[in-house]
Every structure is written in structure tokens, then in C-alpha cells.
Amino acid sequence: MAFERVMEIYVSDNEEYQCYREGMIPVLHSFGGSFDFDFEVSEVLLSKTDDAINRGFTIEFPSKEIIDEFFSNPEYLAVQKRHFVNLVASKTIISMHEKMYNYLLLIVRIKT
């Protein structure tokens, strides 16, 4: 079953963040991962953190084990060190969960 992480971050340099994304996406795809939603946030109305937020996104993987493997992968960590560390002032994991809609789609397909 798919596993999703919902994140919010504060990006201080959009051009460098784009370099980070370009460097990490091939690694992400090699683990079967993808970005499903990506937002630039202009105003935060409610938050459980004091950290600044200007970007939100979801990242999906085939399983919890694979997401853990991805974030500890040496190739990903090299891209993260080169780009992400210096341009992201804060990061907040809002949620990590299995995506239940896959079961719902399967049930609908079976019944139709």
C-alpha cells in the first residue's frame, strides 16, 4: 500500500530549491516515489508550529520501508547536503500515513 508524507517547509532561495528538486527527483523516481501535490503558501492561518512556512507538498512511496530507505540513501543525502540544508530554514512533517484510497478504488472496481 502507498505511503504518503505531508510536509511544510520554508524555502529561502527558490532557484536553489529548484536545483535540489532537479537533483533529487531521479533518486526519488528510482525508489518508486513521486510528488503528488506541491504548493507555494502565501498565508498560514493556523499552525501547530512556530516555524515559518512558504511551501507545502506531499511525497508518496510504495511503502513506509521504502520511504525510510530513500531518506537514508547516500545519493539522496549528497543532493540534500549540496542544496537543501542551506536553503530550507525550517521543515515540518504534518502527517505520515498509508493512503487508504487505493483500497476504495479497488472496491469500486470490483463492484462495477
Image: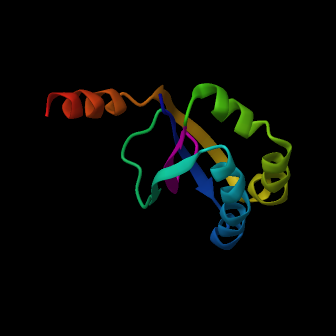
Whether 79 is drawn above or below 96: the answer is below
Q: In this orientation, which residue lies closer to the viewer: 1 or 59? A: 1
* Residue 87 higher or lower than 97, as above or below: below
Q: Can the viewer see residue 52?
A: no
Q: Is residue 93 above or below residue 97?
A: below
Camera-side residue: 22 or 13?
Answer: 22
Q: Is residue 51 left or right of residue 22?
A: left
User: Which stretch appears magenta?
Assistant: 50-61
Residue under the image location 71 percent in, 39 percent down = 70
Q: Nearer the viewer, residue 20 or 41?
A: 20
| Coloring applied to the structure | rainbow
The percent coordinates of residue 5 (x first, y second) are 53, 37
Q: Quadrant of residue 102?
A: top left
In this view of the protein, can residue 41 be seen by the observer? Answer: yes
Where is residue 55 shown, x and y percent of the image? 52, 55
**Residue shown at the point (74%, 62%) measured from the top left:** 23
Q: Is residue 25 above or below residue 9?
A: below
Side of 72 relative to 55 (left or right): right
**Residue furthest bottom in the image:** 15
Count of all numbered marks drawn on residues in the image? 0
What residue lies at 79% left-to-right and 57% top-to-bottom? 86
Question: Would you say residue 59 sits in the magenta stretch?
Answer: yes
Say left or right for 81 vs 37.
right
Residue 14 included in the magenta stretch of the image: no
Looking at the rendered image, the quarter that the C terminus falls into is top left
Q: Position of residue 58 (x, y in %)?
A: 49, 45
Quarter of image, res 109: top left
